[in-house]
Amino acid sequence: MRNHLESLPELSIDYMETGGHGSMLARPIGVQRPEILLCGHLDVIEHSQPDCYRSHLADGRIYGPGSGDMKGQIAILIELMRASHARWPGISLGLALTSDEERGGSDGVRHLCEDMNLRCGVAIVPDGGSLNDVTIEEKGVLHLRVAQDGHEAHGARPWLGENAVEQLLARLMRLRRHFDRYWPEQPVEEQVNHWFPTCCINIVSTDNTTTNRIPDQASATLDIRFPPTHTVDSMLAEVTNALGAGCRIEPLMSAEPTHLDADPLFVQLTEQFTEQPVRLVRASGASDSRFFRKFEIPVILSRPLVGNLHATDEWIDIDSMATYYRICEAYIRMKLKR
């Protein structure tokens, strides 16, 4: 990344590290508030198979973890930045790259916006939606750790102990039943009937490593997503009530639902280059967009065609990468009147 941009003479590049996470911010020299800011994250989801990170090409796609979320888009952003400044030196276009979005973005975009006072006219964040889907709303998110204590005993004498794993599982099943009431009767389909709160129990663990020992400790991590009119506080209250007394609940990360406004110019250009209508959509996930919206900065949230995100066979479509590049290139040129 550095090699692609440092040769541009009128570009100022700052590198910073917060909480062990690095960020890069590139802006024209003397421009603190670029009219357009390109923004992406380099970090990817961790997988247990180390050899899965070797990407490969097949059927017009790039396959591999991080290809669609979002290293494919990073390549587009860097080339947009390089080509635009090479053609129009000093153009009011910036680039922010961070490395902690998958962990919540606190040391990345949040730090840049809240602590470093980064501002811009509009942010382009290709981390949601699709080529013809421009995101206008994102669900809120609440990550929690639930801890349960018990009393250890020999596995042959369960009446002498209190099994923390079993107690925790009973609480989690109550929580699951609570969230089941939000689910529609019909199979869930994206953009049709997905706009309801969900709760995923993604990690359950115990310190116990002995088969014949009743565990005295267990914990679980929860990934909760919710639309308005729910809030972080209201969802935390629901979870606390459903789990009941006698366990510990630790919030790990939270964000309120986010509303985005689609730029009519970007929508027009997307329809022009794809020859298809644009859908304004609601997203189940969250992105770094919320940190810009806190300061009322408009955000454009769409991306090339991607699939199987957070899986080992994640992919991004190469032709759509080129189309997305042309859309953004035209938007930059017309927005900045070049």
Image: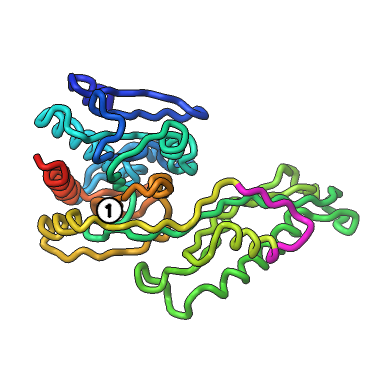
Check if residue 6 falls in the magenta segment.
no
At mark 1, the secondary structure is: loop
Callout 1 amino acid: Ser
- Residues 76 and 61: in front is 76
Image location (x, y in percent) of residue 127: 33, 48
Residue 15 visible in the current orientation: yes
Q: Residues within 10 Å of mark 1 (few under 14, many from 20)?
A: many
For residue 245, side relative to residue 15 (left or right) = right
Q: Which residue was labeled with disc 1?
A: 302
Quadrant location of residue 25?
A: top left
- Please name the residue shown 18% across and 49% down the image: 324
For residue 178, side relative to residue 55 (left or right) = right
Above or below 283: residue 120? above
- Please name the residue shown 21% across and 34% down the image: 92
| Residue that lies at the very extreme toward the right in this rendered image | 160
Image location (x, y in percent) of residue 130: 27, 56
| Colour option used | rainbow
- Residues 327 and 260: in front is 260
The number of numbered discs placed on residues in the rendered structure image is 1
Residues drawn in magenta:
241-251
- Residues 329 and 93: in front is 93
Residue 212 visible in the current orientation: no
Quadrant location of residue 139?
A: bottom left
- Please name the residue shown 79% across and 55% down the image: 163
| Residue that lies at the very extreme toward the bottom in this rendered image | 185
- Please name the residue shown 89% across and 59% down the image: 159
Q: Quadrant of the C terminus?
A: top left
Image location (x, y in percent) of residue 191: 35, 69
Quadrant location of residue 94?
A: top left
Image location (x, y in percent) of residue 282: 36, 63
